[in-house]
Amino acid sequence: MKRLQVTDDSLLGTAAHCTARHGLYFDAGERETAFSMMTFLRQRRLWRGSGARRVAILLALAAWVLPARAQQAESAAPTATRSDVAKFRERAEAALAEGGADKGSWGMLVSDADTGEILYSLNAARYFAPASNAKLFTTAMALATLGPDFRIHTKVVGTGMLKDGRYHGDLVLMGAGDANLSNRVFPFRGKAGGRSGPADKILTELADQVAARGVKVIEGDVVADDSYLDRGRFPSGWTVDDTVWNYGAAVSAVAVNDNTMTLTVRPGKTVGAPLEFSFDPRSNIYRVENLAVTSGAGTEAQLGLSREPESRVFFLRGNLPLGAAPRPLVVGVAEPAENAAVLLTGLLEERGIQVTGHARARHAHDAAATSISKEPTVFAEHVSPTLLEDVRLTNKLSLNLHAELMLRVAAREKGGAVDPDAALKFAAEFRQSAGLQADDALLNDGSGLSRGDLTTPQAIAKWLGWAQKQTWGAEFRATLPVAGEDGTLDTRMEKTAAAGRVQAKTGSFDHVEALSGYATTPHGEHLIFSLLGNNNGLRNHDATMILDSICVAMVEELGAASATGAAPENQPAR
């Protein structure tokens, strides 16, 4: 409704007087709303009649503008008398008043996980970029729709004939969205999990199976087929710089070694010599334009790496001092299927299998993608770890590609969605079915790397509350990093009261820091919290220190006033 400008404030005085007599008071914002509505009524000649009639109108008006405040007051009333909440609030607000932090935007919500009582709220209904806290929505949705025991089968197939060691036809690696065609060790252990064997370990095993079938010659092409998912490699909101590095690796149904390569750079043998480098796994489709040199021993190392969009050339610039240790640079693969075909071809040839054709990719909507006319022969197969294990890996280490593939696979398997937009729609509808409003989370991807993602601390906390009530809720909580122990929180909050008691998802990119999850205080209070910071000019380390200090305050203070029988001091987080 368009606000009407009226200079006479007698109506406002009448409203204040009449409603005050009945125990109702308008605050400043509510007075403006009431004033506009009363002006609207008067100009339409509805503000007439007896005094009783006008009082009735005013009371109705009060009932219209005050319920939100009444609801807030009701939820805030219990916390106002709790000394532990007051102490926490004081410490949290002191942390946010630090130099630099006060220029940023902060949103926070802390609630009692058992009762739902809101203990602390700051801008909790406002939008913030969540960074990798968006993975909380994706991984829980995947567990709910696919189930913790879901597995993916990756196969090497063909429709040709194998006779006397000669296979007539194309040999096809059929991708199905497995993000773990790598050398990762499962189940996840330690601070960063583990790896064993070469980076292309799973492709090596598939090549061994093909050789074991007696294949000596492939009279056709080696094809990597990622048509299970549409070719939407980079979600909306990812930047050009993202796509150079491992955290911005392209999304594809064929994902070997997390769709990354390690470019290891070493100094040359003499000052002035070009730097030496190697790829692992090796790749014939990428090359390096090496403009970097070896500098004198003891000089400062300065390395720069760039790649233009859609280019297969990396530009290496800068220097490494003579005798310096090798520098590994983990870069993203922009053409995952093409690269996988080249890698598999090389592995087959290493096993003495001759390939007469070429290494190539096949994508959704390619004419040949739907040309298979009969049931293919399976020459090799790899079965993924369970979804729960991948969720644990994804949340502990904040792996963007894994989250993106979870989103796409869940939407493909349960909603028939092939393209990225349909997958996002599937996820949004699922969130609504779980109790969120349509505008609670506006997400352009599944990982949170998109700069266009928006959500609220209130929505994240509500989602975490929903997740903990599911049959897999305890398992989901266990997939989150533990403060001072593992994952992306392994070195944070060490030797504080929060160590071992906070299980939360981190999130970070330029000017954004986030931390949301669960905590158990020494006093036995179970908490759900979401802390989001945007538009701050702090260094990432300084911003994380602020969130960590708030977490420590939360664990140390909350529950102290109400606990009658505190949990043992060393009780781990549940």
Image (spheres, grey):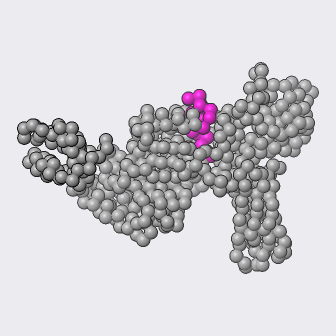
Q: Give the image quarter of residue 421.
A: top right
Indicate the quadrant containing the N terminus: top left, top right, bottom left or bottom right: top left
Within the magenta stretch, is there residue 295?
no
241 relative to 388, above or below:
below
Instruction: Using residue 287 as the reference point, say whether residue 531 is left or right of it.
Output: left
Task: Examine the image and state in which quarter residue 386 appears.
Answer: top right
Task: Residue 49: give x, y in percent of width and height.
Answer: 9, 37
Taking the spot 44% from the left edge, 62% from the top edge, the residue there is 104
Rendered residue at 49%/37% (across/down)? 428
Side of 60 relative to 300 (left or right): left
Residue 542 visible in the picture: yes
Percent from the top left, x then y, of residue 43?
A: 21, 41
Q: Position of residue 512 (x, y in %)?
A: 50, 58
Find residue 255 and report its horizontal and vertical position in percent.
Answer: 69, 43
Q: Is residue 90 above or below residue 337?
A: below
Residue found at x 66% / y 35%: 230
First to last magenta residue range = 401-420
Residue 571 visible somewhere in the drawing: no
Q: Is residue 455 above or below residue 428?
A: below
